[in-house]
């Protein structure tokens, strides 16, 4: 068995067994601190801000991907393997993503709407206090589906291409987008980061999606095609997110909406897209809005690999 395969299985086992490391040991938190320091020094005028943002977009993957390569090149044997497993695990999150989905689906299935709304805050960045049960269910499923790409598929895609340094470089790109990839005050500063993140996710987002409809069973089957599911997308969804129609991520949908909770999903003709909150991601140091979109009204520091754009 190749080193790459054993490193992958080791990272998956580490994630499922222990979840996220503490912030002071988490590479994503380190990325957030570095980029946060650069952000505080950013100019305000459009052209200089754009250039500074482009510099930030180059620094993140360059520095952290480069340091990862250097660290692995200077270690050998078991120490190198353990370091590679830890770094790869820090670039993705399965356990946290599944927990976030279950945190919404279980109270929703039990009829505890207030608890489901509160749990949804780990997945979306907008106010959830007034959301109805169908909107809570739809927002959770869509958010978990898109996060499947950011938090799992994309890091492993870049791991397959460029090893652990590639996965870490992707995480740096995604983390920066989660911090500054908004319209409004940060639009020019975050433009390069947002576009780079969209480009990095172009293939992973489509690998995550299956063209076949996803069926959620709750007595009767509820089936949505991608074209119908697009109507549930938020008005501010990112270009790559358009591929992540919320019904077309079978693994994440199964995590986010239990059969008992599926009855709360709105029908494709309900026209609820404009009421749905912007999703956030597990796997970055900040909550974010979709790249280049309106910034959320709240933010938090969560050193989870993307459970931000």
Image (cartoon, helix red, strand yellow):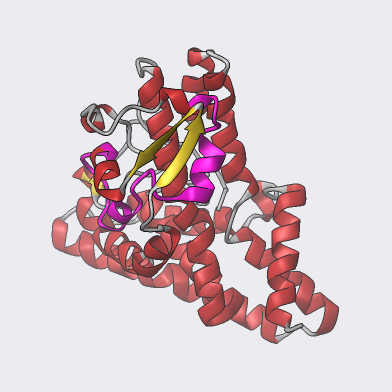
Q: Residue at x 24, y 59 (%)?
A: 191
Q: Please give left or right for residue 46 compared with residue 190 in the image.
A: left
Is residue 198 shown to the viewer in this render? yes
Instruction: Residue at the far right: name it.
Output: 78
Residue at image coords 82%, 76% = 79
Q: Is residue 110 above or below residue 126?
A: above
From the viewer's side, name the closer residue of 294 and 117. 117
- Residue lying furthest left: 46
Q: Is residue 200 left or right of residue 50?
A: right
Q: Quadrant of residue 188?
A: bottom left
In the depicted structure, whether residue 78 falls above or below residue 288: below
- Residue 80 is left or right of residue 203, and the answer is right
Q: Position of residue 131 (x, y in %)?
A: 36, 19
Residue 216 falls within the magenta-colored stretch: no
Task: Kindly tell me whether residue 67 is visible in this rendering.
Answer: no
**Residue at image location 58% in from the left, 61% down from the top:** 91
Q: Quadrant of residue 193?
A: bottom left
Q: Looking at the picture, how far across and down is residue 137, in whole percent? A: 43, 28
The magenta region covers: 232-261
Residue 252 lies in the magenta stretch: yes
Left or right of 244? Residue 208 is right
Residue 42 on image: x %, y %:
30, 56
- For the residue pair 37 and 66, the one nearer the viewer reads as 66
Residue 306 on image: x %, y %: 49, 51
Quarter of the rendering occupied by the N terminus = bottom right
How many marks can you see? 0
């Amino acid at each position: 068995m190749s080193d790459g395969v054993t490193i992958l299985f080791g990272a998956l086992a580490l994630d499922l067994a222990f979840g996220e490391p503490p912030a002071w040991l988490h590479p994503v938190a380190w990325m957030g601190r570095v980029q946060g320091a650069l952000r505080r020094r950013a100019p305000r005028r459009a052209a200089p801000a754009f250039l500074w943002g482009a510099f930030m977009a180059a620094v993140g993957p360059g520095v952290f991907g480069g340091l990862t390569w250097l660290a692995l090149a200077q270690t050998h044997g078991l120490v190198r393997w353990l370091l590679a497993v830890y770094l790869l695990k820090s670039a993705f999150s399965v356990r946290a993503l599944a927990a976030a989905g279950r945190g919404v689906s279980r109270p929703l299935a039990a009829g505890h709407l207030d608890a489901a709304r509160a749990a949804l805050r780990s997945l979306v960045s907008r106010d959830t206090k007034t959301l109805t049960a169908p909107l809570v269910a739809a927002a959770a499923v869509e958010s978990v589906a898109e996060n499947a790409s950011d938090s799992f598929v994309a890091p492993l895609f870049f791991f397959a291409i460029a090893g652990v340094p590639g996965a870490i470089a992707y995480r740096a790109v995604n983390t920066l987008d989660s911090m500054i990839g908004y319209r409004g005050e940060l639009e020019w500063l975050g433009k390069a980061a947002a576009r780079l993140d969209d480009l990095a996710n172009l293939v992973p987002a489509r690998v995550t999606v299956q063209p076949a409809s996803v069926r959620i069973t709750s007595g009767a089957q509820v089936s949505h095609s991608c074209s119908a599911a697009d109507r549930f997308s938020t008005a501010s969804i990112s270009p790559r997110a358009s591929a992540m129609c919320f019904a077309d991520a079978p693994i994440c949908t199964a995590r986010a909406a239990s059969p008992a909770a599926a009855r709360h999903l709105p029908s494709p003709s309900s026209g609820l897209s404009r009421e749905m909150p912007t999703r956030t991601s597990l796997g970055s140091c900040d909550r974010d809005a979709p790249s280049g979109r309106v910034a959320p009204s709240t933010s938090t520091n969560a050193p989870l690999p993307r459970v931000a754009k």
